[in-house]
Structures are given as structure tokens and as C-alpha cells.
Image: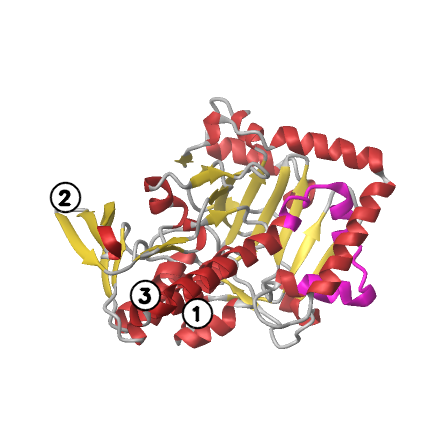
Amino acid sequence: MIGGGPAGATAATLLAERGHHVILLEKARHPRFHIGESLLPANLPLLEKLGVAEAVKAIGMEKRGAEFNSPWHDHQQTYEFADAWDKSMPMAYQVRRSEFDEILIRNASAKNVTVIEGCQVQEVVFLPDAQGAQVQAQHDDGRLESWRARFVIDASGRDTFLGNQLKAKQRNKQHNSTAIFAHFSSVQRHPGRKEGHISLFWFDHGWFWFIPLADGMTSIGAVTWPYYLKTRGKKSLAVFFQETIALCPQLVQRMTSAKVESAVEATGNFSYVCDHTHGDNYLLLGDAYTFIDPVFSSGVLLAMQSAFIGADTVDTCLRHPDQAAAALKKFDRSMRIGPKAFSWFIYRLTNPTMRDMFMAPRNVFRVKEALLSLLAGDIFDKTPIWTSIALFKTMYYIGAISKLKRTVHAWRVRKRNIQPVAETSATYGDQ
């Protein structure tokens, strides 16, 4: 197992519970910082199956909905997960990923996974005739070590280890974004049950996330078009981020007493996809396969969901080789469900027609309930949302055509804005 984030720790746990000897190699040492702090309601049944639901509850802030804020509209729009099609998943959690990820990897260790931290994979050599692979890695003290594996799972996240080694990783030509983010204290929150709501703020260059955490910190990040980060020039990220926040008056109102409590960091070129999900003796899970955008907080869910189907797939391949082809085909289909479902909305989120629809939802033919179910991550089970989602898309296209001049202008602007900018391809950080 390459990587000990949510995908790797989950898949490793499930395979170990089925009697497989699993070695998990994680380049960092937990706890370690990571963005992606907002879970979805559909995560909770997976946490129950792993046996960590109570541990996550203890470190989480209840998240019962999402709030959208637009400078082009005169109101806020709040969505409650309890109003989704399936009423049985009314909440999720906001979590510090350092705590959440450590819960998952320690659970893996407790379930007899051999967890080796501070150990970075250098190369995977696949052996002929489907005889497995030789995995070579370096410990953080410089020692080299190798293992013979029957099956390799890449859960390396945005490192996309096998995607890079196999030259399978491609830029997503339909989307591109950068992010600047930090943790703040003394940020104004909503009272009562809405305290843990995630908030989205649109502004001219993209949108902000606003994620309240249980310890009083608030994670705030700006997701922008690549060109915008390039305008930073020689300014420090801290100064540039404050200037970016100032461009969003609705967010500024909630940060009048805020104090930055972490390094301000930035990352670029978010969106990519690998040209396949698996080989005969390896799988790509979660972000190691694809990542589009953090807007709907789908990353951890897609990682863990891929781990569940991935564990089933590997177990079948190792125990029943005659069924491997069918299992891998099923895995491939499953891996494409989530990105396909979310990407249609992601690609249109900054379109004025989509903003109008999010800010004035209608529940005709249960369209709003279906949208909420999708936002809750309820896309893998049998909740019958897809006819209503198709109707939502039809309403979008009708609205877009009715204001064709605005739509064409927005499309041209987006096409220009998603062009890659070389200077934003790295990860940056400062105080």
C-alpha cells in the first residue's frame, strides 16, 4: 500500500481484516497537516464499518449543511442535509485532517496492518507473467528496503506515484485551479446548529471555503483561476492572501477579529486524471487516480469509497484469479462514478446560470432533494436521484440558453481562465 491517507489506511484495514498481509508505506509521520477537512454524510456509514465512528465524532465539528454566499445576489442560501432525498444522513463532520488521518492509520495498525511511516516509495518494478511487483523504498534515515508484493495499491494521493511512473497522469483540460489557504482563530461563526455549516463565498476570481473546526480554528481557503496566483508577484503569501480575502466583503464581515494561526500555503494545478484505474496487479485509489476540485468536499468520500471497492477487488483477484477480470472491470466502473457525478457541477460552478440556480433552488419533481443527496455524497447506493438530477441539468440548459449572450461570455472567460500557468504548478508556503 503506497500512502497512509484515508484511501490507503481504509483499504489496508479492510484487506487485513480478510486475512491478507498488508504492508503500508507512508512517506510522512502522523499526525501531519493536510487540507480537505470537510467530510460528507455518506462518509459516516463507511466510518461505522471501519469501527472508527466514535473516535471521529470525538474530534469532529457537526456539519449539518452548507451555505452559499454570492456578491451578485442579495441573500444567503442554506442547504440542510436533513432535507435530502434520503433523510437518514442528516449530518457529517468537519475534522482536522491531522487527527482524522491518524485515527484511520492507527486503526489500520490495530487491525494487523504493517504500518511503516517515514518511508517513501522510490520505484515499483512489475514482474513478468503477473508475478507481482518489487517495491523499493527509502526510510527517512536513508536506509533502503524492498518488498515483494503480489498486489500494489497506489493510495499516494496527489503524489500520484504510479500515475507518474507509468506516465499515465494527464492534465484535466476541462478544469484548472489553484488554492491559497490557512487556519484562523476568532472568526465569526453562526450560532447553534448552524455553527458547523461549511460556507462557500463566490468572488470575482473564484470562490472561498470556510470550514469551522471543533477546536475553534476555521480553515479558510481561496480557490482561484491559475492566472490569479501569478499576480502575487513578490508579495509574501500571507500578504497576498489577506489582499485576496479583502476582495470578498461578505467573508471580510466574518473575519473582523480573525487572526491567522498557521502558515499560509498555496498549491497549483489541482485538476488531473490518470488514463486508467488499474493494471493486472495494481490499483489507483482516490486522488492517486484523479482530482478535480475541492468545492463539494468530495475528496475524502471518493478516497474511502474507492478503498472499499478496491479492497473487494484485490481480495477477489488474489483468492479467485478466474474472476479477476470481471472484478477489475467493476472497479473501473465504480472509480468513474464519483468524478463523473461531481465534475458536471464543478465545471459550471462559476457560471452565472448555475449560481442563480444554487441561490434560488426549486424542489419541482424533487430536484432540490436530489441535489442535496448529491452534495451529501449519496451517489453510490440506490437512492433514485438521477431522474431529478437530469431534470436539474435540463433546467440549467434552458436557463443558459434563455440568457445566451451571458452564457457565451461566461464560457469564453472560463475557457481562457483554465489555461495552465507554469508558475502555479508547485506548492508554496510561508508565514
**Disc with the residue nearer the chain's start (1 vs 2):** 1
Camera-side residue: 81 or 414?
414
Q: Amino acid at mark 2?
A: Gly
Classify residue 325 as left or right of residue 184. Answer: left
* Callout 3 secondary element: helix
Q: Which residue is mark 3?
A: 12
Asked which quadrant contains residue 103, the reply is bottom left
Looking at the picture, which amino acid does disc 1 mark? Val
Mark 1 element type: helix
- Could you give the CA–CA distance between mark 1 and mark 2, rounded to whole angstroms? 34 Å
Alpha carbon separation for disc pair 3 and 2: 25 Å
Label 1, residues with CA under 10 Å away: few <14, some 14-19, many ≥20: many
Q: Looking at the image, is 97 positioned above or below residue 228? A: below
Check the picture and name the quadrant holding the N terminus.
bottom left
Can residue 23 be seen here?
yes
Verify CB contact (< 8 Å) between mark 3 and mark 1. Answer: no
Name the residue: 38% across, 69% down: 323
Q: As displayed, is residue 338 above or below residue 399? A: below
Kindly state the secondary structure of the residue where label 2 is placed: loop
Residue beneath disc 1: 56
Q: Position of residue 53 (x, y in %)?
A: 44, 74
